[in-house]
Amino acid sequence: MKDLIKYISQALVDNPDQVEVTEVIGEQTSVIELRVAKEDLGKVIGKQGRTAKAIRTILSATSAKIHKRAVLEIIE
């Protein structure tokens, strides 16, 4: 899941080398933290959060297949 979020995020931003994705794994829930360059933050979030919501939807569909829960946090 970490690689999927990194791949999607790098395709969206102008500085793909500054995309950092870390995963904190718990028993039932994984928290995926996404860090991008400050000027690319708006591109990852999108208008009214639509892009971020779409990424979270893809993440939840992927995590449902492996019977885990995943949460995406976009960190400034």
Image (cartoon, rainbow, N blue to C red):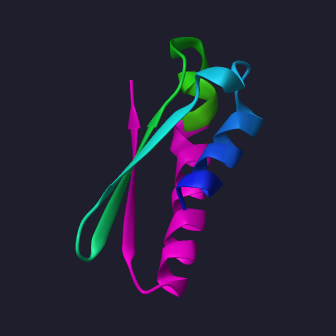
Q: Residue at x 29, y 69 (%)?
A: 29
**Where is residue 31, by image quadrant?**
bottom left
- In front: 63, or 24? 24
Q: Count the labels in the image.
A: 0
Residue 47 rendering spot, x and y as whole percentages: 60, 35
Q: Residue at x 69, y 19 (%)?
A: 15
- In front: 19, or 74? 19
Q: Which residues are magenta?
A: 47-76
Farthest residue, direction left: 27
Q: Residue at x 54, y 17 (%)?
A: 37
**Where is residue 70, by image quadrant?**
bottom left
Residue 68 rendering spot, x and y as whole percentages: 38, 79
- In front: 55, or 10? 10
Q: Reply yes or no: does residue 6 show up in magenta.
A: no
Q: From the viewer's perspective, is 16 left or right of 30?
A: right
Q: Quadrant of the C terminus?
A: top left
Residue 67 vertical position relative to residue 53 in the rendered view, above or below: below
Residue 5 rendering spot, x and y as whole percentages: 59, 51
Q: Quadrant of the N terminus?
A: bottom right
Q: From the viewer's perspective, is 14 left or right of 49?
A: right
Q: Reply yes or no: does residue 67 show up in magenta.
A: yes
Farthest residue, direction top: 39
Residue 39 rendering spot, x and y as whole percentages: 58, 12
Q: Residue at x 51, y 14 (%)?
A: 38
Residue 26 vertical position relative to residue 52 in the rendered view, above or below: below
Q: Main secondary structure of the magenta part?
A: helix
